[in-house]
Amino acid sequence: MKVEKNSQKLKSINTAGVILKPSSPELKDEYLNIKELFENMDIKILIEINSAKMIGLNDGLTLDELCNKVDFLVSVGGDGTLLSVSRKSFKSNIPVLGINLGTLGFLTDINMDELPKFLNDLKSDNYKIDERMMVEGSVNLNKFVAFNDIVITRKSISSMIKINAKIDGKPFNSYFGDGVIISTPTGSTAYNLSVGGPIVYPLTEAFIITPVAPHSLTQRPLVMPADFEIEFKISDSQGAVVIVDGQDIYEVEQNESIKIKIASQKAKMLHRCERNFFEVLNEKLAWGN
């Protein structure tokens, strides 16, 4: 098996900050269990303020305060929770561990029954930190970062949308259909996959541009190096909607542009050394069954 090039380690493993899936007060017992497991390994637990309030606790900290006090963050929920935590803590450059209480779990690979072993491995330096490409984008005066994808789509379901695309300022395509997905390699297994886009190894640095229900059958997904800047200009008179990681939404009017480039920093994710992307694909997508 090929050895990962990245051999980063945490500077210390003394304090972790927990963020729970929103609107899930039933996670209180899971949190208390996680807290006990961590503290048994001499790792102090702090909790984010909204998560604390949700489960009836009064000792929460803001995410910024949490990032300044902990060695790593712990996202408890599913991939959506991990996406949100990674984006909101992006500027802090702090690793995130995902505990999976969801279903699919492409990003959150540690289940509750695997947590005790992982904590032992963590204390023994038997873990890895993946660095995942992030995307920076701008819509008018709004700037944002994306972990998975940016979707440009029509405002009305009754009509198609036309989007003119440029790479480094030079026109290269016009998309006419339901929209376009601009995905990171990590996000290639999300919406991109569901519309027939390619799966790309998550530690790659590349953009995946995938048309959604294109009017022309000649339109195909495109994988390109991440050192280009991409611009999408809306030709449709009704404008468009830009959706970032399925969580933030921006409206764009006719002749306005969305500019996208690789982010200056990467997201850091804590994983088991045993985690193998191709085994994950085999399990989650039931390949060979």
Image: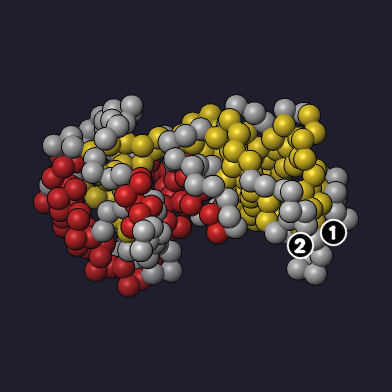
User: Residue 274 falls in which quadrant of the image?
Assistant: top left
Q: Quadrant of residue 238?
A: bottom right
From where the camera sits, is residue 264 visible?
A: yes
Q: Earlier in the sequence, mark 2 or mark 1?
A: 2
The C terminus lies in which quarter of the figure?
Answer: bottom left
Q: Nearer the viewer, residue 81 or 29?
A: 81
- Residue at 57% x, 45% y is 183
- The N terminus - image quarter: top left
Crowding at dot 2, Cα within 10 Å, few <14 / some 14-19 / many 20+, comes out as some
At a point 77% along the width and 29% down the height, the residue shown is 169
The total number of labels drawn is: 2
Say if 226 sits above or below 81 in the image. Answer: above
**Residue 25 location in percent, x, y?**
36, 71
In this view, the residue in front, 47 or 207, is 207
Identified at 74% across, 53% down, the residue is 217
Image coordinates of residue 97 in percent, x first then y, are: 32, 47
Task: Report if the CB atoms under discs 2 and 1 are less than 8 Å apart.
Answer: yes
Q: Nearer the viewer, residue 219 or 245?
A: 219
Mark 2 vs mark 1, CA separation in Å = 7 Å
State the mark number for residue 117: none
Residue under label 1, please give it: 238
Q: Which residue is mark 2?
A: 155
